[in-house]
Image (cartoon, rainbow, N blue to C red):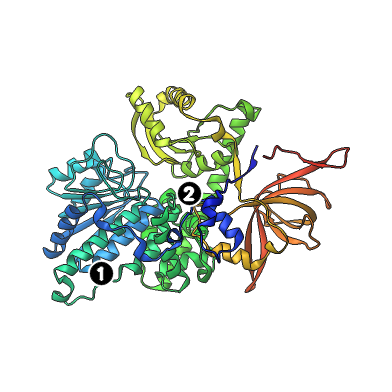
């Protein structure tokens, strides 16, 4: 059961923001701890310096030598959107800087699993690279790096995942989360780390007059920021100020028509207007289509789409990714139905649910368990781990957490107490992966609940929607909706504004089978407003004239080239009338 909770706004912070800021936007920024106009500056000049990253000079030494000696370079990526954008970025930027022999390899998750494993090193060795560069992986690849060294291959690890107590014996490691790293933003995605390394490399090559000596035009790395923005948003890393700069700069290039053909094609097949691109387009339209390749097939398809120079080829690849995404949705829908039926069968009352859920079916698709865990987490507001069989007798698990529980740290605690349980694990605060023996699943589930009982706060399971308060009269305005739309970028850790209030239902109809299209009238207003509640058609039986409490986003809807105001409903709670004539909510609202 979800509840609405108003965000706290510190008046002193609000008073220190620019005087000409719209009052609603002032309130929104203050609730997100924005205290200085400098924090609203998303120009490239506001980025932290690459030199602050530990290991970056050693990494640049390796890359500069590889370019000068015309060595073979192999980029080893990951099979999600962050990994795909990281790989496309590293390959295309190194080629632009003059690398003559650079290629990529992405482990097929079904054959090799995650990261630079000894098995993938054996495949890589066939192309005889002098240098392997990992992107969005490698920090946990102890055995893989050792295998490369035995083959005489140097390894440069670029990653952002949290390291274990032992680091790989790589020739260089660039990861803002490695011990002793002083880089101020620990929230870089893998593609952000790769971009920073490339900035440092370009600086070195520029100082040596590499481009002039070799008759090459120096690349403008800002042209690659569409990739950085896409990977950063899709990986759901917190959008601290540094990441907001990267994302905003990338979005500006997409809107200006200066993005690569693959991203434009993915926007087109998703029905999104690139000229009005915002972060949510990457999160809910482009990212899932890119991820579908890694979930169901081979992420090389996604990387090739991002590397495509020809718009026709990019469009063809984007259509293939779109088809895979539709297939993924069908598989996910069936798996979600099975998972919800299982939870409801075992726990009839949501109040009796355990602190966390471990779910497994031997027929589940291992490429879709991550998004399944995310969907079930959204339904029950607690950490979820979904498992699938990855090999005979072995399970792969994908975990999704709730605010207040660092899921990777929870797995680390399990591994410390029960060393025999987890074969390997890794991840972030909100998402993680692991593998274990199938017969040990019950023991793992018990250990997971044991750790949760000692670490999680009950408030984290409340399913709270945080609201920025109510809107009044003239604030229901298309101009304000457009202002809020452009005031981000919004995303993880810097959430898009949500408002709440009481409305009267004037009209309703079902659209697209699952969505509620509403006309609602705010209190003390005579006009009706358009509203859309996605995927909520089966959840409510509403009557004309009924009063509703809504949590909503003030949004604009583009239809046949025209913009109109629309409320995007996040939570709909019917109000019931008491005998006194007052109205109360059928669900608790704080």
Is 100 displayed left or right of 397 in the figure? left
Q: Position of residue 407 (x, y in %)?
A: 43, 36
Labelled disc at residue 493: 2
Residue 394 in view here: no
Q: Position of residue 216 (x, y in %)?
A: 20, 75
Q: Quadrant of the C terminus?
A: top right
Viewer-nearest residue: 372 or 586: 586
Labelled disc at residue 348: none
Is 370 displayed left or right of 161 in the figure? right
Give the residue pinned by disc 1. Answer: 96
Q: For label 2, count other residues whose C-alpha is less than 10 Å away and answer few (under 14), some (14-19) or many (20+).
A: few
The answer to which image quadrant residue 307 occupies is bottom left
Q: Position of residue 26 (x, y in %)?
A: 56, 58
Disc tally is 2
Residue drawn at x 60%, y 40% as measured from the top left:
464
Q: Earlier in the sequence, mark 1 or mark 2?
A: 1
Q: CA distance from mark 1 to mark 2?
A: 34 Å
Q: Position of residue 232 (x, y in %)?
A: 41, 55
Q: Quadrant of the N terminus?
A: top right
Viewer-nearest residue: 420 or 181: 181
The answer to which image quadrant residue 39 occupies is bottom left
Q: For label 1, count other residues whose C-alpha is less than 10 Å away and answer few (under 14), some (14-19) or many (20+).
A: some
Is 508 displayed left or right of 491 in the figure? right
In what element is the residue under mark 2? loop
Residue drawn at x 36%, y 31% as measured from the top left:
412
Q: Are marks 1 and 2 in contact (CB under 8 Å)?
A: no
Is 532 displayed left or right of 410 in the figure? right
Callout in the foreground (1, 2): 2
């Amino acid at each position: 059961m979800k509840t609405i909770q108003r965000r706290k706004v510190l008046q002193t912070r609000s008073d220190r923001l620019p005087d000409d800021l719209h009052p609603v936007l002032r309130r929104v920024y203050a609730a997100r701890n924005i205290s200085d106009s400098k924090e609203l500056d998303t120009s490239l000049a506001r980025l932290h310096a690459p030199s602050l990253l530990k290991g970056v000079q050693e990494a640049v030494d390796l890359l500069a030598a590889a370019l000068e000696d015309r060595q073979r370079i192999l980029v080893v990526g990951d099979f999600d959107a962050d990994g795909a954008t990281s790989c496309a970025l590293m390959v295309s930027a190194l080629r632009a800087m003059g690398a003559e022999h650079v290629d990529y390899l992405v482990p097929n998750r079904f054959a090799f699993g995650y990261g630079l494993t000894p098995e993938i090193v054996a495949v890589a060795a066939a192309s005889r690279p002098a240098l392997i560069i990992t992107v969005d992986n490698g920090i946990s690849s102890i055995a893989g790096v050792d295998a490369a060294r035995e083959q005489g291959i140097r390894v440069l690890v670029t990653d952002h995942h949290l390291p274990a107590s032992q680091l790989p014996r790589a020739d260089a490691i660039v990861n803002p989360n490695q011990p002793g790293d002083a880089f101020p933003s620990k929230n870089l995605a893998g593609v952000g780390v790769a971009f920073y390394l490339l900035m440092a490399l370009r600086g070195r090559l520029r100082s040596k007059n590499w481009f002039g000596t070799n008759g090459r035009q120096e690349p403008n790395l800002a042209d690659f920021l569409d990739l950085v923005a896409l990977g950063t948003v899709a990986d759901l890393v917190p959008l601290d100020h540094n990441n907001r700069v990267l994302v905003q700069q990338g979005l500006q290039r997409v809107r200006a028509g200066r993005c690569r053909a693959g991203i434009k094609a993915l926007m087109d097949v998703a029905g999104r207007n690139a000229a009005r691109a915002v972060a949510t387009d990457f999160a809910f339209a482009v990212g899932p289509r890119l991820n579908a390749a890694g979930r169901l097939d081979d992420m090389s398809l996604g990387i090739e789409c991002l590397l495509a120079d020809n718009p026709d080829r990019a469009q063809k690849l984007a259509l293939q990714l779109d088809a895979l995404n539709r297939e993924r949705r069908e598989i996910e829908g069936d798996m979600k139905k099975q998972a919800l039926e299982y939870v409801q069968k075992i726990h009839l009352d949501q109040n009796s649910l355990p602190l966390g859920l471990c779910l497994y079916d031997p027929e589940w698709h291992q490429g879709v368990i991550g998004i399944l865990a995310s969907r079930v987490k959204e339904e029950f507001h607690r950490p979820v781990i979904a498992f699938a069989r990855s090999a005979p007798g072995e399970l792969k698990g994908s975990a999704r957490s709730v605010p207040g529980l660092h899921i990777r740290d929870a797995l680390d605690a399990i591994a410390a107490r029960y060393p025999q349980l987890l074969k390997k694990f890794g991840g972030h605060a909100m998402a993680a992966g692991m593998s274990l023996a199938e017969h040990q699943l019950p023991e793992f589930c018990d250990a997971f609940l044991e750790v949760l009982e000692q670490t999680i706060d009950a408030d984290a399971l409340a399913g709270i929607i945080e609201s920025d308060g109510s809107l009044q009269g003239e604030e229901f305005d298309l101009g304000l909706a457009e202002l809020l739309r452009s005031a981000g970028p919004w995303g993880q850790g810097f959430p898009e504004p949500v408002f709440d209030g009481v409305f009267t239902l004037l009209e309703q109809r079902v659209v697209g089978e699952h969505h509620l299209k509403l006309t609602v009238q705010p209190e003390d207003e005579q006009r009706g407003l358009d509203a859309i509640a996605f995927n909520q058609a089966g959840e409510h039986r509403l009557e004309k004239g009924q009063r509703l409490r809504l949590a909503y986003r003030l949004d604009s809807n583009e239809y046949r080239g025209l913009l109109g105001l629309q409320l995007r409903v996040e939570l709909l709670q019917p109000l019931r009338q008491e005998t006194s004539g007052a109205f109360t909510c059928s669900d608790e609202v704080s």
